Image: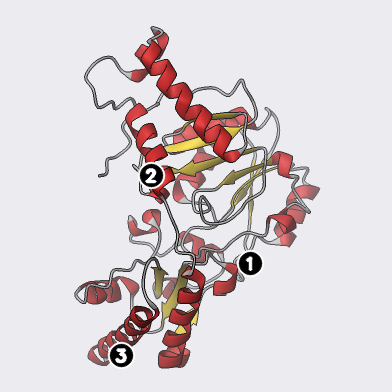
């Protein structure tokens, strides 16, 4: 089930949620309070609130969280919605300093040091990046930005890795199988402003999706076996964007030389093998992944990118898939000659 951003969508007929809250509707207040308390307790924060994860709402939350007059360092590897939020803050007059990335996937220490010398104290970055699935070394980041002055996008991290307690955090419900227009904002400020676009139905669904989400305990073993089989079959025709050991255990982003990912994806779909060339924001655009481009890869290399995620597959199935994908790749290249 999916829908576009729809503030105040409610399954039952009646007044919009914002009106029911203003009127003091007890059922609505109780249900909303219970959801806020659940997520605050789960992540160890004093306050949690619904976030529709639109650029406007993200910008509003950042503007509330970072004191007026303070500059904000923004990772160049953030998702499209987060980057658009940063642009909105710039339009409002906020000073935004963008942090570059190195080709190994990490935030550039040189760029972070430059930001510190420019007296930038607050940082907005992701714990795990889009597209590359790279896990940021938050201990390394803490050498330049204090955790108490860091806002994290934990969308790709929830239920997958541990991440530090920071000033504030946000995550997108879509990453857990919930609606596009759902998410949560977390902080320790009891004065946290409640955004107008509260969708109680989406919020409730997000809680259910969060509780149901599981990841295969043997995902890393299967991921590594899959990459090994592919590399053994294709050799130099396959390349890795980021070393898998530095990424989420159930994911890998690889490049197939000489073909465009979108064409290869269609070919594999005919074999009931479903993969992607990036996260949602990359898929919606004709341009290659902005995140991979930020790492310093060429446009051609980025257009070779295919992302894989693994769940409940046996090792035999993993080996079969690697063999099948390698065969279809060679077949496709032969046709293109």
Do the residues under discs 2 and 3 have CB atoms within 8 angstroms?
Answer: no
The residue depicted at 23 percent of the width and 22 percent of the height is 12
Alpha carbon distance from label 1 to label 2: 34 Å
- In the foreground, 306 or 313: 313
Q: Which residue matches tag 1? A: 102
Say which element carries label 3. Answer: helix
Quadrant in the rendering for residue 323: bottom left
> Would you identify the image quadrant in which residue 1 lies?
top left
Q: How many marks?
A: 3
x then y, percent, for residue 32 = 43, 23
Tell me the element at label 2.
helix
- Label 1: few (<14), some or many (≥20) within 10 Å? some
Q: Nearer the observer, disc 1 or disc 2? A: 2
Q: Which mark is residue 209?
A: 2
Sooner in the amino-acid sequence: mark 1 or mark 2 = 1
Q: Are marks 1 and 2 in contact (CB under 8 Å)?
A: no
Q: Is residue 205 above or below residue 279?
A: above
Earlier along the polypeptide chain: callout 2 or callout 3?
2
């Amino acid at each position: 089930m999916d829908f576009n951003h729809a503030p105040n969508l409610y399954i039952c007929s009646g007044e919009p949620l914002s009106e029911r809250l203003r009127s003091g509707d007890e059922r609505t207040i109780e249900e909303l309070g219970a959801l806020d308390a659940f997520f605050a307790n789960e992540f160890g924060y004093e306050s949690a609130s619904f976030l529709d994860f639109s650029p406007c709402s993200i910008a509003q939350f950042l503007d509330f969280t970072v004191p007026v007059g303070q500059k904000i360092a923004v990772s160049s590897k953030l998702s499209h919605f987060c980057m658009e939020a940063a642009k909105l803050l710039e339009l409002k007059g906020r000073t935004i300093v963008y942090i570059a990335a190195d080709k190994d996937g990490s935030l550039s220490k040189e760029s972070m040091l430059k930001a510190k010398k420019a007296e930038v104290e607050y940082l907005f970055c992701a714990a795990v990046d889009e597209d590359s699935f790279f896990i940021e070394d938050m201990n390394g980041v803490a050498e330049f930005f204090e955790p108490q002055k860091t806002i994290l996008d934990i969308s790709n991290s929830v239920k997958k890795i541990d991440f530090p307690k920071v000033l504030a955090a946000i995550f997108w419900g879509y990453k857990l199988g919930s609606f596009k227009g759902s998410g949560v904002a977390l902080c320790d400020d009891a004065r946290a402003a409640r955004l107008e676009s509260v969708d109680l139905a989406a919020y409730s669904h997000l809680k259910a999706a969060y509780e149901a989400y599981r990841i295969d305990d043997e995902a890393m073993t299967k991921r590594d076996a899959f990459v090994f089989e592919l590399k053994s079959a294709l050799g130099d025709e396959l390349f890795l964007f980021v070393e898998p050991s530095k990424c989420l255990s159930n994911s890998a982003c690889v490049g197939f030389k000489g073909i465009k990912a979108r064409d290869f994806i269609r070919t594999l779909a005919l074999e009931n093998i479903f993969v992607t060339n990036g996260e949602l924001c990359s898929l919606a655009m004709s341009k290659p992944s902005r995140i991979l481009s930020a790492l310093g890869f060429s446009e051609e290399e980025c257009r070779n990118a295919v992302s894989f995620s693994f769940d409940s597959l046996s090792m035999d199935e993993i080996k079969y898939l690697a063999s099948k994908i390698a065969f279809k790749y060679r077949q496709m290249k032969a046709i293109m000659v």
